[in-house]
Amino acid sequence: MSEIPPPPVQPLRERDGKVELLDQTLLPDKERWIHIETVEQMREAIQSLRIRGAPAIGIAAAYGLAIAASNSDVTATSNLLADLDAAGARLASARPTAVNLGWAVKRVLGHVASTTYGSTEALRDAVWTEARAIMSEDLNMCRRIGLAGAELLQGGSVLTHCNTGGLATAGYGTALATIFMAHALGQDIHVYIDETRPLLQGARLNTWELSKAGIQSTLITDNMAATVLARGDVQAAVVGADRVAANGDVANKIGTLGVAILARHYDVPFYVAIPTSTIDFDCPDGRGIPIEERAPAEVLEFRGARTAAAGTEVYNPAFDVTPAELVSAIITEHGVIRPPYRENLAKLKR
Ligand code: MRU
């Protein structure tokens, strides 16, 4: 078996005791790392998509709590726990759709609440340790998702929507990890990248990540996907998710539903690659998934230049929900899950 290289891209790092994010709003033009020193800076970075992608914003929120712990100057552990709760509420409310955000906050707060600490210093250390654990576990999960997905793909041309690579996770990615691993294992793989309107995560971030990894890709605008599928140029579609409901309904970047419908029409498998932290067992089906609506300017303008008449009304949902019946398989760190999803996801939980 070929050697799996280390992740070529990661969205967050610790440098000289500081947390830094690679500002994804500037890619691919500029690779700029920004220091995050407060909870409000982390919240702003999540909301403005300087860091984005479901697993990555969970990791960012966990580090936001670590920063909150370091910044708090209280001397009683009960007061530090109260400060952490307040910071957790700010971070978890930054974006509504990705379940990983609230999941990571709950995990860190639950972990520190379940132990008694002899000092605020010990409690601070525990928050940092848990944030680092979430990051390293995510990297390990992504590696395993990638390997499970590569086995399913077996080369060929794959269509993907939105960025689901190293930038969107601790490293490697989810849907893109399946492609990275397929390539690392020597499969002949090529990617059709949906541009991903309106914020171009596909065009800006996937082209950047795939070219760094030396993987062949072709960029298309979202409305070209039907033509590519109709021509028979694609053997599988692979996407990530921000939240998967207990019945297998999938919330992902706006435009994913269209890809799933096209894939079914042209008889191409439609795969969803996720870490299990993206499954919301408390959400029975897709109707319960909150969908973020973003600023009209994202649709009215292109990189600062207006592209529609002034005063135009806009609808700008950032995500859509693909019904489970259109999903051929869900690729997780525990392997490939097939329908019926309610039963098979529940088994995974057990
Ligand atoms: O708005 P974004 O860029 O955060 O949306 C990201 C996506 O929709 C991804 O497909 C999803 O988070 C999975 S990332 C591994």
Image: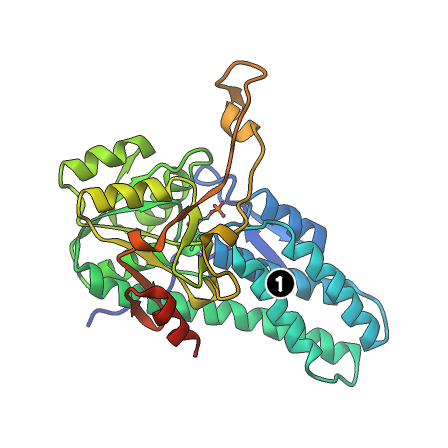
Residue at 55%, 62% (x, y): give it.
59
Q: Can you say which quadrant of the picture contains the N terminus? A: bottom left
Disc 1, SS: helix
Tell me if 44 is positioned left or right of 323 in this view: right
Instruction: Estimate how packed mark 1 is, as few (under 14), some (14 to 19) or many (20 or more) residues with alpha carbons within 10 Å.
Output: many
Of residues 135 and 152, the one nearer the viewer is 152
Tell me if 303 is positioned left or right of 160 in this view: right
The colour scheme used to paint the residues is rainbow
Residue 290 at x, y = what percent?
55, 49
Residue at 45%, 57% (x, y): give it.
285
Rendered position, 131 above or below 54: below
Of residues 337 and 234, the one nearer the viewer is 337
Residue at numbered disc 1? 63
At label 1, which amino acid type do we have? Tyr
**Residue projecting furthest to the top:** 309
Residue 35 at x, y = what percent?
64, 52
Is the CB of mark 1 within 8 Å of ligand 1? no
Residue at 82%, 75% (x, y): give it.
78
Residue 200 at x, y = what percent?
42, 36
Q: Can you say which quadrant of the picture contains the C terminus? A: bottom left
